Amino acid sequence: MLSPCHFQEGAMAAHEHWQMDASAPELYERYLVPAITSVWAEDLLDRLGPAKGESVLDVACGTGVVARRLAERGHAGRLVGVDLNGAMLAIAQGKSNDIKWIEGSALDLPFASRSFDVVLCQLGVQFFPDRPQALREMARVLLPSGRLGLSVYSAIEHTPAAHAFVQALDNFLGAESSRTKRAEHLSCGADAVGNWVRQAGFGRVRVETVTKQIGFPSALDYVRFQLTATPMAALLKEEDDAGRERVIKAISDDVAARMDPSMLANGRLTFPQESFVVVASLR
């Protein structure tokens, strides 16, 4: 049974895990954005359908895939991305000068009230140390007719590769090693997520449980990207190159052994990934 999933559950103090070094954001953009976050970005934009001319804010934008995808669709209105991580924003800035990128916290958005028609937040809510405050801030900066779109990973057991990966991490590196990966996922259901949004002041809220097929060239590549292109790279910081590769190979073999063989067809890794997707309006 899923837990009630309190607002603070799984939150990480002071954003400790998402302050990456200079190379990790580049790897994240190169490998994980095409494989995972761009898939969810397209889904979120399809559901919200921001109209040309609407002002749009992308909260916890990372390297900016949501705002950039919207710009590529020909959006003509104001586009702003905000994130606490300067290294991720530097990648975003290098990808697009047409979008305004601002370093700032989701808990205290650096914008006046009623500034945007649409607020988007892809796969970020789970990391906020104060989720109610972040959602209230999103409501505050929206116009009275504004709309919110957000996505957040559901229970890790519903994403087979991630579940196999944390079990393999625990097996090889100890139970605490999987904490960062587990924090990407909620342990509650869709109803709880909907209630969070309503409590933040949104009057109309729709939550859907959505599954996308995610693909990597191999289980080895999946594990390598997780342990080099995310904050989990810190787990192997004491290893030299050869030692790091040995650990990655051992963990990837463990991951593959835990997967349904159908997800490893032709040497690739293909698996379902589940998220809750919220579309809401203030009234």
Image: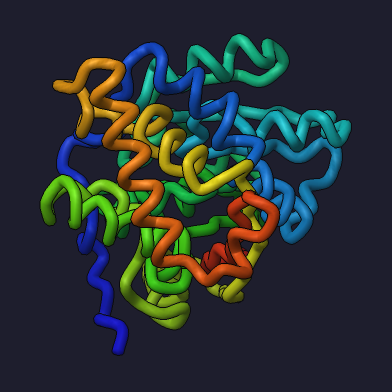
- Placement of 176 over or under 20, stated as above or below: below
Q: Is residue 114 left or right of residue 23?
A: right
Which color scheme is applied?
A: rainbow
Q: Quadrant of residue 13?
A: top left
The residue depicted at 69 percent of the width and 36 percent of the height is 55
- Placement of 221 over or under 171, stated as above or below: above
Of the pair 60 and 10, the residue shown nearer to us: 10
Q: Quadrant of residue 14?
A: top left
Locate residue 43, reporting x and y percent.
71, 55
The residue depicted at 47 percent of the width and 66 percent of the height is 259
- In which quadrant of the rendered image does the N terminus lie? bottom left
Of the pair 144 and 69, the residue shown nearer to us: 69
Of the pair 258 and 227, the residue shown nearer to us: 258
Locate residue 34, reporting x and y percent.
66, 36
- Say if residue 266 shows up in the picture: yes
Q: Is residue 10 left or right of residue 23?
A: left
- Placement of 259 over or under 104, stated as above or below: below
The residue depicted at 61 percent of the width and 49 percent of the height is 143
Q: Is residue 157 left or right of residue 97?
A: left
- In which quadrant of the rendered image does the C terminus lie? bottom right
Q: Tag count in the figure?
A: 0
The residue depicted at 50 percent of the width and 18 percent of the height is 26
- Say if residue 136 shows up in the picture: no
Locate residue 190, reporting x and y percent.
46, 78
Locate residue 109, reporting x and y percent.
40, 35
